[in-house]
Image (cartoon, grey):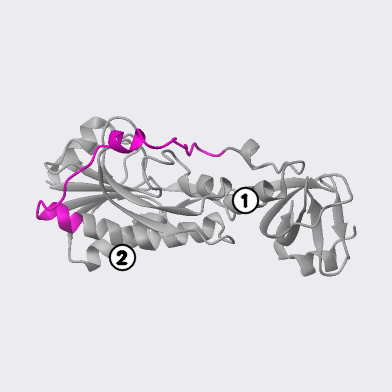
Amino acid sequence: MNIVFMGTPDFAVASLDALINAGHTIVGVVTAPDKPAGRGQKLGESAVKKYAMQKQLPILQPSKLKDPTFLAELKALKADLQIVVAFRMLPEVVWNMPPKGTINLHASLLPQYRGAAPINWAIINGEKESGVTTFLLQQEIDTGNILLAQRIAIPPTYTAGDLHDKLMEVGSKLLVDTVNAVEVNQITAKPQSDLIATELLKHAPKIFKEDCKIEWNRPVEQVYNHIKGLSPYPTAFTFFQDKTLKLFRVELDKTSPEVVPGSVVTDHKMELKFACQDGFIIVKELQLEGKKRLLIEDFLRGTRL
């Protein structure tokens, strides 16, 4: 069975690698065009492109997915199946092309957390479990019929980065199981509408800068989840000495504060914490605007408070 793989970041590389190691035939890889990055604005290649080059796989990098040249090149690959992992929204002319359709791997238990940032929102909302789902692409985003799903527990200290890495690993295995089953027609797709009737849906929209600002007057548990859910990227921030301060790693302290929310309490050596409505956020790793990312003791050693 000939497969075209579509993806861009590291999360997708794990799936592509797993498919190749399982013996599946990848006839082409579609990924994002090279983009200028860094101070020198040197063209940067996607993680998927770098991996595909190592494996000497044919690579397509369309700027527009409806471009006639790209569509002709894609059709010429004669894929039986297309797989999408962390790519962009496909037009119907693309996802409807192969005879066995197009499978997407999504980092949530669909129909929950449809959208661009399911990993972040699961942590922000304090979920105790998450998972991955494979489904067949249809017109509306993340609404297609479900093929397989795998559930995992979320440990209380997990950041979005931790959950990303775990779901990347679990998702790559689930994708291989899905493709194996599709290849021998041993799988039945289930409509998401069967599940929607029994669940209140939570969504996972794209996260913007204004979503990352920390509101210290909220309950400490909510602030803790908010910071973890944005770490390491796009990173929760506050203002400190008139500069942006990003918080990467924090701990929870449920001691009732005797200062107003947003107040800073520090011993100037090893500890710095921010007051919330009903507790403190203890900062362990941070980055002040214009400075490097530091452990809290290194930050306190070099900062006058």
Is 234 inside the magenta-drawn segment? no
Locate residue 156, reporting x and y percent.
57, 60
- The magenta stretch is 179-207
Q: Is residue 137 left or right of residue 234?
A: left
Secondary structure mainly formed by the magenta segment: loop
Q: Position of residue 216 (x, y in %)?
A: 76, 44
Numbered disc 1: secondary structure: helix
Quarter of the picture containing the C terminus is bottom right
Evaluate whether residue 126 shows in this view: yes
- The location of residue 107, given as percent across then percent down, is 40, 50
The residue at which mark 2 appears reads as 54
Tell me if residue 1 can be seen.
no
Q: Report how far apart the C-alphas of labels 1 and 2 lie in the structure.
A: 38 Å
Residue at 30 percent of width and 33 percent of height: 193
Camera-side residue: 212 or 150?
Answer: 150
Q: Residue at x 14, y 44 (%)?
A: 100
| Mark 2, other Cα within 10 Å: few <14 / some 14–19 / many ≥20 | few
Residue 205 on the magenta span: yes
- Quadrant location, the N terminus: bottom left
Foreground pick, 290 / 164: 164
- Dot 1 corresponds to which residue? 225
